[in-house]
Image (cartoon, coloured by chain):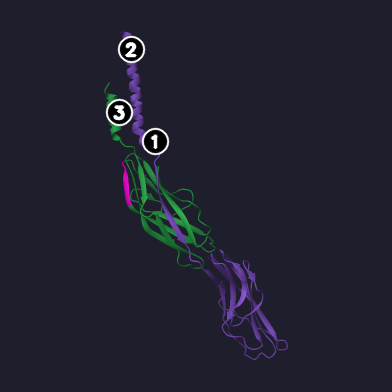
Amino acid sequence: MKWPFFLFLSSSMSYGALPSTSINVSQGAIRLAITSLNSGSGSATNNSSTYTASATAGMGILKITGQIDQMMPAQSTLLATLATQSGISTGPTFLSTTAKNLVTTINAFTGFTDVNQTINLTFSISSGYAGGSSLTRTVTYTITN
Amino acid sequence: MVLNKNKNQLLRGIVFKHLFSIALIWSTLPALISAATSATQVLTLTVPISASISVSSGAVTIPILSLSSGAGSATDSSSTYTATSTADMGTLRITGQIDTAMPTNSTLSANLAAKVGTSSGTTLLSTTAANLVTAIDGSTGFTDANRAITLTFAVSPGYASGASLTRTVTYTITN
């Protein structure tokens, strides 16, 4: 008669707090300035910012995605590379308005914290670019199942 | 008594059954939670505004093969130019000039084809810049690739400046 109650209480104590995830970035604003062009092509890279991601236990397998709020103009690209210790980085990945995997296979069954991992961003244009001399894009990084 | 005992057993069974269900749901709750947390970064992306022009051939020979009453001409259209600009460059033009004035009774003219702007047609070159293409819309950036350059060297009676000349033509894209 007491046995099931014991099982229930034991289970509730293991998960006294709901599992959760978090991700934050060290710099909310980044400037990528192409300073010179060669035959209409050029690029700029910034790796000064980092992210910290974490999850409590029981979150299963997680991934980090990235997407931008507006499409990049023709003949221009924005690449993101997220370093990781807990998952697998997908390497340089073109950002678009649909979420792209940047880090996959983060094992969060027992919780994890990945602190100050480098965010590498590269803005490139090629000949024929006509998207203006200054653009603003918001990158959203999401940690999710 | 027997009836009450059976009722109690039935109730216990129901309670046990639900307790197991609750325990099962609670234990698997983490896997059922769809956790999505986000962070954002605002990127300012800047591009230098610039315009460029290049030619396909750095050296051209224009030989006049024959004269008629001391006059003759030769044309070369083997080379092309490619002009491009980033956005915000306003209205652009392409000019051409030579490094040294042509001798008396000779001329060098250039005609640049254009798709984006307006060609000035055949234009005499001198040591001051002459418009070859005008009204190029550089407000949103452009590329005009592999457009023909037609150069014409002509002499007229009285030309007396030697059998061979060298001139450097400078093409400039500017506002």
Q: Residues within 10 Å of mark 2 (few under 14, many from 20)?
A: few
Residue found 68% across the figure and 82% down from its top: B73
Q: Amino acid at mark 3?
A: Phe
The overriding secondary structure of the stretch rendered in magenta is: strand
Spatial CA span between label 1 and label 3: 18 Å
Spatial CA span between label 2 and label 1: 37 Å
Which tint is chain A?
green
Contact check, label 3 and label 2, Cβ < 8 Å: no
Q: Is residue B123 magenta?
A: no
Contact check, label 1 and label 3, Cβ < 8 Å: no
Closer to the camera, A64 or A138?
A138
The image shows residue B129, relative to residue A10, as above or below, that is: below
The image shows residue B30, relative to residue B92, as above or below, that is: above
Q: Which residues are magenta?
A: A110-115
The image shows residue A89 at horizontal and vertical percentages of: 39, 51
The image shows residue A44, relative to residue A111, as above or below, that is: below
Q: Which mark is residue B32?
A: 1
Q: Which residue is mark 3?
A: A8
The answer to whether any part of residue A94 appears in the image is no
The image shows residue A13 at horizontal and vertical percentages of: 28, 33
Q: Which mark is residue B6?
A: 2
The residue marked by circle 1 belongs to what chain? B
Closer to the camera, A97 or A29?
A29
Q: Is residue A113 magenta?
A: yes
Q: Residues within 10 Å of mark 1 (few under 14, many from 20)?
A: few
Image quadrant containing the N terminus of chain A: top left
Residue found 32% across the figure and 45% down from its top: A112
Q: Amino acid at mark 1?
A: Leu
Q: Secondary structure at mark 2?
A: helix
Labels 2 and 1 in the same subunit: yes
Residue B69 relative to residue A65: left or right = right
Residue found 53% across the figure and 70% down from its top: B52
